[in-house]
Amino acid sequence: MVDMAQTSDEYMDGAKDKAPASRFSMARTKGSDLTARGEPMVWAMGGSLAFGLLMISGFLALIFWNGFTAFWPKPLEIVTTVSGRTIAGEPLRTESYHPGAEILAALEPSVRDAIIDNGGFADRTLYRIGNYDFYGNDFEWVSAYEVKSVATPKDLMLVERQEWGVFIGTLISMDADGQVSNRPTLDALNAAHERTRALREARIAIEKGPVGDINHEINELRLSIRRAEIKYGTDSPEMIAAQEHAASETVRLTKEFDKLSAQVLAARAAEQSVTVKVADIGGDARDFPLANFVLYYFANDLSLAAKVQIYLERWWEFLSAEPREANTEGGVWPAIFGTFVMTVVMALLVAPFGIMAALYLREYARQGRIVSLVRICVNNLAGVPSIVYGVFGLGFFAYVLGGSIDAMFYPEHLPAPTFGTGGLLWAALTLALLTVPVVIVATEEALASVPRSMREGSLACGASKWQTIRWIVLPRAMPGIMTGLILAMARGAGEVAPLMIVGVVKLAPELPIDAIFPFVHLERSFMHLGFHIYDVGFQSRNSEAGRSMVFVTALVLLALVLVLNTVSIIVRNRLKRRFAGDKF
Amino acid sequence: MAIAARKDELRPGAADAHYDPTVYHPVTSPQGTEISIRDFKLWYGSAQALYGVSMEIQKGMVTSLIGPSGCGKSTLLRSLNRMNDLIDNLTVSGDVRLSGQPIFGPQVDVIALRKRMGMVFQKPNPFPMTIAENVTYPLKVDGVTNKKLLAEACESALKGAALWEEVKDRLQESALGLSGGQQQRLCIARAIAGNPEVLLMDEPCSALDPIATMRIEQLIEELKSSYTIVIVTHNMQQAARVSDNTAFMYLGRLIEYGETKNVFTRPTSKRTEEYVTGRFG
Ligand SMILES: Nc1ncnc2c1ncn2[C@@H]1O[C@H](COP(=O)(O)OP(=O)(O)OP(=O)(O)O)[C@@H](O)[C@H]1O
Ligand SMILES: [Mg+2]
């Protein structure tokens, strides 16, 4: 192309016989130019890689930084403004902003001029002021020009409460069974706190354990009547017998229930016997049961060890506790568990389906136009928006399949659905459907890469096709199949959109695996980390409150996917090692 | 794959003016014929690879197939245990029999047929399993699970393949850790563990060094008393050393077949003479 012009010149000169020779020599001299050596392409390739890496590492750095610093206890400040107001809070971040015209107009001339000199920008800091029950607001912006003075008194206290979020203020007194002590020592407070928290946990254990069991039994009795009615007809002797049995049992259970209720009430009273009086920065003093405090500390009076301890305590609560305060506080344990169980169930479902489909496609089906068509369709399935899978999962799995299961096996529960609504099993099935193309493609590739000599060796020994596949081809293809499963699991664990339709909920009261027979409850709705991120970040009353939780939850989700993948990769490498040392 | 009477089949000599009709030197053995091949033709799709091969492979003898690359030696060998079944669009015609029973045909049990013939490939292909598992694979295929039986079969096959002394202490180690020559002998052990009647070897020494080759040749010598062996080789000295009978093939045709010493010292066909003396090939 480059030497076109010259060549055609030569043709025009009529030097046709000389053309080949000169073209040859030109090709030689052009051989080492920049495009020929491909250097711009190399730069472009390197640049693309660097750009990709930069974006990914930037994204990870953002999540890691925000996720890991979220729980670190920050100092508390008391800000006194020029207008004489005092604000106590945790400074979260500072930014420049453009104050509006009316705001500027209302300012002192000197301040206004300073802002205008600064190009119309002013600084402001976001404070977490907490005390939602006092102010009806958790966060407040304070502009730099408003600040008269900032103090960090040592007696300022931050409390994470069971309800109403954070409290920031000062401790006035503690009332333990009528014994009032003004400004109690931290040790006394801690001792009382530990005692009342233990009482509270015992009370919750009763409510969740025996009380829950009684409710479960009463429900079972009701269902047994209904079952008898469906099976033998209304007012049949069996139904009347069931009713009588239920009536006598209910009397017993009610008695037990009353006894437990009394216990719970007593426990609640004991737990509330210790109260503390605290006051916010404006002097508004109120009493709270100490048992309602989850965590408290004097933020400006902390040693490094104490900070580390608080940091770790918060992490532990986050990983092991249930959420509270509309998911913006507390932990994500149910979501971690739900994500884990769903991903594992999905992998268990997708593996046999995908592997068997790929085996048929690659090993048994006659390779031809139809198989190619099927292959193209399978590949294109990966491009269907995942929300469409969700709709399908709800419509087909939950309503059609689940509805039939309910009609057949759980008629006494109706009209309340058991399997006939979104749940863990249907969510896992939907995701299995979503990820099965990945497994099929990977398995097919793995099968194709098994050397022909292996199959021939086996067949020559008189093995049938199935024996060859079972003993030679599959083991050999296993690492590749595992790679496909790993990809499918990573994809499935991070998927949110279809789950919102087929079974994920904001708050699930029960875990999908527990001590109640049959222990694994795949029909239950469940919590999911991905959905939790969406819910906390975009659906809560205050997006600021969920901000740090979004990052921490994202971090946990990443970690969970990492753990699942690491386990599979270890398994895969074990398998691979068996085929290492393949030499000649 | 099916036996098909092809309309477009080439009559020997019809397309190739230089075609020599096959020269048969008398071949006999005390036990008689093991495999008889009559007018065997084979097509890969529409390309014909074998043009009417006819020969009698003698029982208890070593028969070598020689000829230039691409002449159809492997094709013929792999037809005997129907390894070619794996290939799509394959057509064959003619009559091939193993001890009088047909090899091709709809009613033939291919798996039973393959169990009667062990095969050794050009490149050693041990399975990614332990040495013992490799050797006893044919028994596993037959559903043998008795540990004692398996151990005995493993030992006798490894001894038969002259590998026992080298691997008896590492039977539970991966077979992939063996040297190339050991791997090939392991494959021979695997082939004889199923107790076949015929051993088919497709250039078994081509991936091995001279010393490993020598060991395999010795082994063939020893195995000859118990098995009928058909071996494909490119090495003229090897054919001369190990085989009783030799078949020379050229362009899908059998050119000359007879006792090895006759084929090598008094070849009748000019092509055979040129090939065995190394003037072409
Ligand atoms: N799977 C196949 N499909 C189509 N043609 C094939 C196939 N296998 C072999 N052939 C052709 O059949 C002819 C005979 O091949 P074959 O492998 O039998 O030769 P060979 O004598 O074993 O050669 P070599 O000594 O190189 O191994 C060749 O022309 C080859 O191209
Ligand atoms: Mg060959």
Image (spheres, coloured by chain):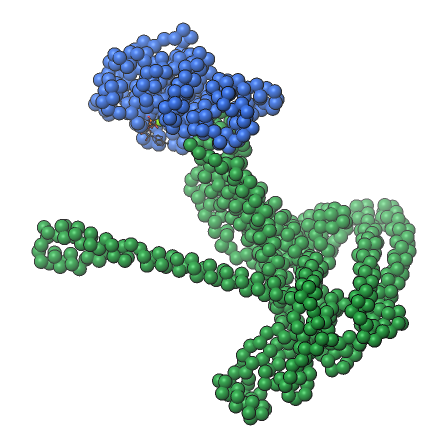
Chain colours: A green, B blue
Q: Is residue A199 left or right of residue A514?
A: right
For residue A39, above or below residue B225: below
Residue drawn 70% across the image and 69% down it: A302
Q: Quadrant of residue A161?
A: bottom right
Q: Position of residue B55 (x, y in %)?
A: 35, 15
Residue drawn 80% across the image and 63% down it: A194
Residue drawn 45% across the image and 29% down it: B179
Q: Nearer the viewer, residue A255 or A401?
A: A255
For residue B22, above or below residue A78: above
Q: Is residue B57 visible?
A: yes
Outermost bottom residue = A109
Please tell me in which quarter of the rendered image ligand 1 is found. top left
Q: Position of residue A235 (x, y in %)?
A: 85, 50
Q: Is residue B3 visible?
A: no
Q: Is residue B201 left or right of residue A508?
A: left
Looking at the rendered image, the quarter that the N terminus of chain A falls into is: bottom left
Outermost left residue = A14
Q: Is residue B76 left or right of residue A225?
A: left
Q: Nearer the viewer, residue B114 or B103?
A: B114
Q: Position of residue A37 (x, y in %)?
A: 29, 54
For residue A568, above or below residue B11: below
